Structure formats: structure tokens, C-alpha cells
Image (cartoon, helix red, strand yellow):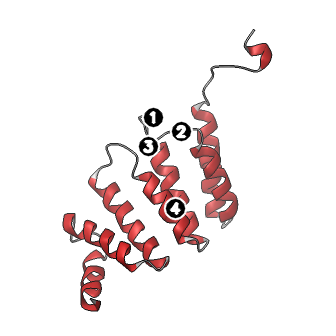
């Protein structure tokens, strides 16, 4: 009876997510960033940071990169921050997100938060990308 009214307990399949996710990546690689954003948003709506997979993390991270590419760093901050909701991130994932957050805050004209996240990375991994030079240059300004 529930199915007659369109009420089902079915969850979206992994295939639904995979199709959207890979389509969004293809759009991103073709430079169709706005289309990629739309499809990544559809994909991320099918998952949760607590679903025991890396799907939410991957989508949120890529949404952040897409928003950076379209010149919307404050929107990128939102998605990089959401990616941090994923439990059990390893050090490299966490450092990468902190670094991306710092870069997005910098691009959004928020040097205080940018410096805070660069310092978080530096505190745990002085050799991560160019974080040491970024922290040194920030210290020289202050």
C-alpha cells in the first residue's frame, strides 16, 4: 500500500551517488564548473558525513575547490568546513582541509582566519606544501 502512494523506505543507491559524482568530476574536468557544482550538490544530498564512507568528504572537498575556481571563496569556506564534519579524518586529510580553508579565507579577504588555519597546519606538519613560508610571511607582516 505504501508503494501505491509513492512512499517507500528505499534509500538512494550507491549507483545513484556514483553516477552523479563521476558526472560532476567529468564536468569539472571539462571546465563546466557551474554544472559540476550543481551535480556535486545533488550527489552530496544523497550521503552523510556519518554514513561510514568518504563520499561526503570527497564531495564537500570538491565543492570547495569548484567554488574557489568560480571566485566564491566564502562559499568554498562553507564546503571545506563541512568536509571537516567527516569522522576519522587522517592527518593528511585534516591538514589539507585546513590549508584549503586558509587559502579560501585569504582569498575572501579574511587574513586573521587564514593565518589561524595556516598555523594549525604548521603546528602539526611544518613540511606541508608551502605552509612554513606562508606562516613566516604572515609573521613578518604582524
Q: In this view, does 43 lie to the left or right of 93?
A: right
Q: Residues within 10 Å of mark 3 (few under 14, many from 20)?
A: some
Residue 47: which numbered mark, if any?
2
Separation of residues labelled 1 and 3 (CA atoms): 8 Å
Residue 64: which numbered mark, if any?
4
Dot 3 and dot 2 residues touching (CB under 8 Å): no
In the image, residue 83 above or below residue 72:
above
In the image, residue 76 above or below residue 13:
below
Q: Quadrant of the N terminus?
A: top right
The residue shown at (62%, 61%) is 28
Separation of residues labelled 3 and 4 (CA atoms): 15 Å
Q: In this view, does 100 lie to the left or right of 39?
A: left
Q: Mark 1 points at which residue?
A: 51
Relative to the observer, which residue lies in front, 88 or 16?
88
Q: Is residue 63 left or right of residue 118?
A: right
Circle nearer the N terminus (3, 4): 3
SS for dot 4: helix
Q: How crowded is mark 1: few (under 14 residues within 10 Å), some or many (20 or more)?
A: few
Tell me where residue 91 appears, x and y as whole percent.
27, 54
Q: Which of marks 3 and 2 is in front?
A: 2
Residue 54: which numbered mark, if any?
3
The residue shown at (35%, 43%) is 87
Tell me where residue 125 appears, x and y as whole percent.
22, 66
Circle nearer the N terminus (1, 4): 1
User: Farthest right residue?
Assistant: 4
Dot 3 and dot 4 residues touching (CB under 8 Å): no
Dot 1 and dot 2 residues touching (CB under 8 Å): yes
Tell me where residue 68 appears, x and y as whole percent.
54, 70
SS for dot 1: loop
In the image, residue 6 above or below residue 141:
above
Relative to the observer, which residue lies in front, 50 or 40?
50
Tell me where residue 101 appears, x and y as whole percent.
41, 66
Amino acid at each position: 500500500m505504501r508503494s501505491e502512494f509513492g512512499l517507500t523506505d528505499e534509500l538512494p543507491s550507491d549507483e545513484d551517488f556514483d553516477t552523479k559524482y563521476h558526472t560532476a568530476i567529468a564536468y569539472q574536468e571539462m571546465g563546466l564548473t557551474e554544472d559540476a557544482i550543481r551535480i556535486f550538490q545533488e550527489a552530496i544530498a544523497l550521503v552523510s558525513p556519518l554514513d561510514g564512507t568518504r563520499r561526503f568528504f570527497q564531495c564537500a572537498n570538491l565543492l570547495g575547490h569548484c567554488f574557489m575556481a568560480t571566485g566564491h571563496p566564502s562559499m568554498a569556506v562553507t564546503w571545506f568546513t563541512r568536509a571537516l564534519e567527516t569522522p576519522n579524518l587522517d592527518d593528511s586529510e585534516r591538514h589539507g582541509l585546513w590549508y584549503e580553508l586558509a587559502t579560501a579565507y585569504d582569498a575572501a579577504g579574511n587574513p586573521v582566519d587564514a593565518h589561524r588555519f595556516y598555523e594549525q597546519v604548521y603546528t602539526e606538519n611544518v613540511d606541508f606544501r608551502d605552509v612554513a613560508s606562508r606562516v613566516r610571511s604572515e609573521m613578518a607582516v604582524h
